[in-house]
Image (cartoon, rainbow, N blue to C red):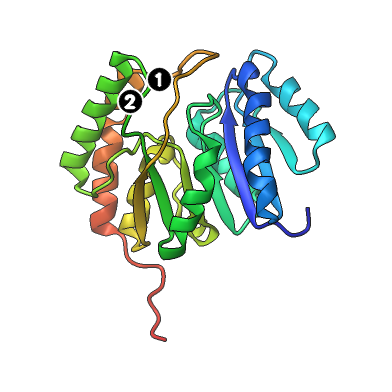
Amino acid sequence: MNECAISVIVPCFNEAENVEPLYRELAEVLMPMNKPFEILFVDDGSADETPHKARAIAAVHPEVRLLRHKRNFGQSAAFMTGFENAAGEIIITMDADLQNDPHDIPRLLAQLEGCDIVCGIRAKRKDTWLRRQSTKIANAVRGWILKDGIRDAGCAFRVFRRLILRQLICFRGLHRFLPTLCVIHGFRVCQTEINHRPRMSGVSKYGIGNRLFVGIHDLFAIRWYRKRHFPINRLED
């Protein structure tokens, strides 16, 4: 694809039953826009049929690409792989579990007209009580430490301009702090409620252990970075 307006990056880990329906929904939403787009499925070392399902889709639909990790490196690494290979001027990130609704994309793109990144907020979570509580606790803790105003840092459904990519720091847990880094670097950040759907297939990979406790030291690292960074665009116009 020589010219690309929109790149959709979808990390996948053991989501074999969700890849095909997700592609169909994305195509249903993106094709009527009449803008060149690509969908990057980033397989993060799946042990099921996920890469085979994605490869079969890519064989028929040239706008789809499959990128594969040698083993499981985590969601942040999958996003970075997608960023490094994306061709679009606008980047969309989302989960592969079908809980993010592709039909929200046109509204998120419209909101991007007035900012640099639009972050989804799962106001009406369709998850188990444990998942809702773990996210609530994690957001409360990070909000208390970082005071960045990000309401749902765990939501991967985001739309942003490509220029943001040059300011990213590569580390485990990046996907949870991408909006915070945008705030730190002075980008215009918008937040909006999105439709959140129940998981119908596959198994969730997240809980209190890897939502809160694993990332607690990252919170203080990001707080340190906020105090020590200097702006990239320092020259006078």
Q: Residue furthest front?
A: 32
- Locate residue 65 relative to residue 129 in the image: left or right: right
Residue 28, placed above or below residue 135: below
Residue in the picture at 48% in, 36% down: 76
- Locate residue 107 relative to residue 65 in the image: left or right: left
Q: Which residue is mark 1?
A: 206
Crowding at dot 2, Cα within 10 Å, few <14 / some 14-19 / many 20+, comes out as some
Residue 154: mark in rendering: none
Give me the C-alpha separation between circle 2 and circle 1.
Answer: 7 Å
| Number of numbered discs | 2
Residue 56, placed above or below residue 103: above
Residue 63 image position (x, y, % from top left): 75, 44
The answer to whether marks 2 and 1 mark residues whose Cβ atoms lie closer than 8 Å is yes
Secondary structure of residue under mark 1? loop
Residue 207 image position (x, y, % from top left): 35, 18
Label 2 vs 1, first from the N-terminus:
1
Q: Which residue is mark 2?
A: 211
- Locate residue 232 relative to residue 217 in the image: left or right: right
Q: Amino acid at mark 1?
A: Tyr
Residue in the picture at 28% in, 15% down: 129
Q: Amino acid at mark 2?
A: Arg
